[in-house]
Amino acid sequence: MGTVYLAVDRKHGRRVAIKVLPPDVAAALGPERFLREIGIVARLSHPNILPLHDSGQAGGLLYYVMPYVEGGSLRRRLDGASLQVPEALAIGREVADALAHAHAHGVIHRDVKPDNILLHEGQALLADFGVARAVGDGEITDSGLPLGTAAYASPEQAAGSRLVDQRSDVYSLGCVLW
């Protein structure tokens, strides 16, 4: 739902990724989901979850800043090559740890897939909480509207059920590992 740009944080001399909510998306969907994503990521602190550096509004655009991950996504790593079992299990374990942390804090990711698993110096980082749901928060989407990526979604999630819970993320991680 956002556009991600590579930028340089001049104050700290580091490369960062800036996710910006484009005006057309903000006009069509409103800023609530983007602001909710920022709030969810800001309250999750785990070594296998891509952290939030900063957020705000500039020139009428909402944005948030996160570390730039040099290694790219698991999807990119898999292009044209498979993983050895020990490497796949290590990535799976780290993503499972990240999901356990999110679940313990009442957050369901709802879009676990290779594109949202970043690899940095041999470590997996779960990213993109754009369709995540905090348990107890009201849904912004209409009832019956499936969210996430169909190839990795649990049957309940693909059907647009409101009964999607932590088990859906576990199912999605199983699909990634498969």
Image (tube, rainbow, N blue to C red):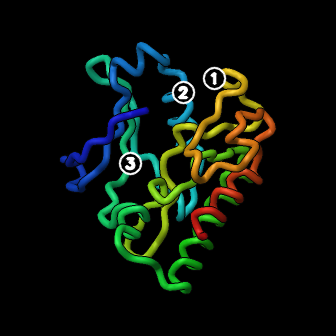
Mark 2 neighbour class, 10 Å CA radius: few under 14, some 14 to 19, many 20 or more? some
Mark nearer the viewer, 2 or 3 = 2
Q: Amino acid at mark 1?
A: Ile
Label 2 sits on residue:
33
Q: Amino acid at mark 2?
A: Arg
C-alpha separation, residue under disc 2 versus residue under disc 1: 7 Å
Q: Residue furthest right?
A: 163
Tell whether label 3 touches label 2 (CB within 8 Å).
no
Closest to the observer, 1 or 59: 1
Find numbered disc 2 in the image and state the secondary structure of the residue it sits on.
helix
Ranked by sequence position, the earlier of labels 2 and 1 is: 2
Q: Amino acid at mark 3?
A: Met
Ranked by sequence position, the earlier of labels 2 and 3 is: 2
Q: Residue sitting at 72 percent across and 23 percent down?
A: 143
Label 1 sits on residue:
140
Q: Residue sitting at 66 percent across and 52 percent down?
A: 102
Q: Position of residue 59 (x, y in %)?
A: 26, 19
Mark 1 neighbour class, 10 Å CA radius: few under 14, some 14 to 19, many 20 or more? few
Tell whether label 1 touches label 2 (CB within 8 Å).
yes
Label 3 sits on residue:
66
C-alpha separation, residue under disc 2 versus residue under disc 3: 18 Å
